[in-house]
């Protein structure tokens, strides 16, 4: 299985939790409040989902945290970056790729390794069951699909980045309406129905459980790569190889330049 697949994630679970350095934990007071209200809030959520025709799942770093991954506020809060006076927003600058590639690939390479070695938590499977039982096959879902196919919206508006749209034939031949078109990094075989997921997470875990046509990643993910030259050699996007793993010195969080991708 490809590391971006469910099977590979399960193997990752066997190698350990893949917990990133600096993962946050709720305080005891927060734990107590959550426990006290869990029954009430679950009943409210269940009632809302049970009465809904459409489910829009919006997720951020907190959703990944339940898998053992660090949230944005903590991922760079470790000694090697503190020694350099760097915080998360300082490291997330594309200029590091040219100015100090070992820092760039050290940070993103370790994120990449941790995301691949961490299995998605059981909440993904739960939501997938809800979607399959209530939102993918309902009359409302069928009506949504029919309407979207009639509109023939470009795939850039329905969950895939622009370069993927180019690979499947551009705006006039959306991957949603031209299923015979060449596929991009994630094969789009259908149009979404009554379920859709919008996420700011970059771990690609949503693709382990949900269909490609149901996902919009506003920041992309670490599995996808594109030429970053001032004059790009290609506009295509490709997935990282199955056997790719970054060599990162955890004491410095640097990737040796001679072993960093180019």
Image (spheres, helix red, strand yellow):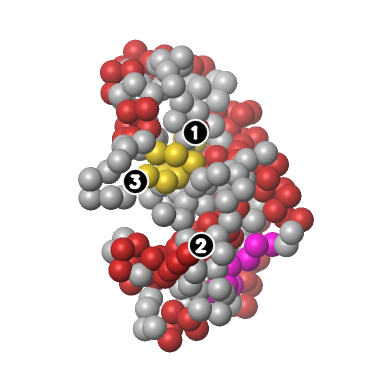
Height in image: 15 above or below 237?
below
Residue range corresponding to the magenta coloring: 17-25
Q: Earlier in the sequence, mark 1 or mark 3?
A: 1
Between disc 2 and disc 3, the foreground one is 2
- Element assignment for label 2: helix
Q: Is residue 66 in sight in this rendering?
A: no
Q: CA distance from mark 2 to mark 1?
A: 27 Å
Q: Are marks 2 and 3 in contact (CB under 8 Å)?
A: no
Q: Earlier in the sequence, mark 2 or mark 1?
A: 1
Q: Which mark is residue 227?
A: 3
Q: Residue at x 59, y 60 (%)?
A: 114
Say left or right for 36 vs 171. Answer: right
Residue 237 position, x and y percent, is 40, 39
Most distant residue in the front direction:
258
Q: Which mark is residue 186?
A: 1
Q: Quadrant of residue 46?
A: top right
Most distant residue in the bottom direction:
83
Q: Are marks 2 and 1 in contact (CB under 8 Å)?
A: no
Residue 220 position, x and y percent, is 41, 47
Residue holding disc 2: 259
Quadrant occupied by the N terminus: top right
Q: CA distance from mark 2 to mark 3?
A: 18 Å
Say left or right for 240 vs 198. Answer: right
The reply to whether the magenta stretch includes residue 18 is yes
The reply to whether the magenta stretch includes residue 150 is no
């Amino acid at each position: 299985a490809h590391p971006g697949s469910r099977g590979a994630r399960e193997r990752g679970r066997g190698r350990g939790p893949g917990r990133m350095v600096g993962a946050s934990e709720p305080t005891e007071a927060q734990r107590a409040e959550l426990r006290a209200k869990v029954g009430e809030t679950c009943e409210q959520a269940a009632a809302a989902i049970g009465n809904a025709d459409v489910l829009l799942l919006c997720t951020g770093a907190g959703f990944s945290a339940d898998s053992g991954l660090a949230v944005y506020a903590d991922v760079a809060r470790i000694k090697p970056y503190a020694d350099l006076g760097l915080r998360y927003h300082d490291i997330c600058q594309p200029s590091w790729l040219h100015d100090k590639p070992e820092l760039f690939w050290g940070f993103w390479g370790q994120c990449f390794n941790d995301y691949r070695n961490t299995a998605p938590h059981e909440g993904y499977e739960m939501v997938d069951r809800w979607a399959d039982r209530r939102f993918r096959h309902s009359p409302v879902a069928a009506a949504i699909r029919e309407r979207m196919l009639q509109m023939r919206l470009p795939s850039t508006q329905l969950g895939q980045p622009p370069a993927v749209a180019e690979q499947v034939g551009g705006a006039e031949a959306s991957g949603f309406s031209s299923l015979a078109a060449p596929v991009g990094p994630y094969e789009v075989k259908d149009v979404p129905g009554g379920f859709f997921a919008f996420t700011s997470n970059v771990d690609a875990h949503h693709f382990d459980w949900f269909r490609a046509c149901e996902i919009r990643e506003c920041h992309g993910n670490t599995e996808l790569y594109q030429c970053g030259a001032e004059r790009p050699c290609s506009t295509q996007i490709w997935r990282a190889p199955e056997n790719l793993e970054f060599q990162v010195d955890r004491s410095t969080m640097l990737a040796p330049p001679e072993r960093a991708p180019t």
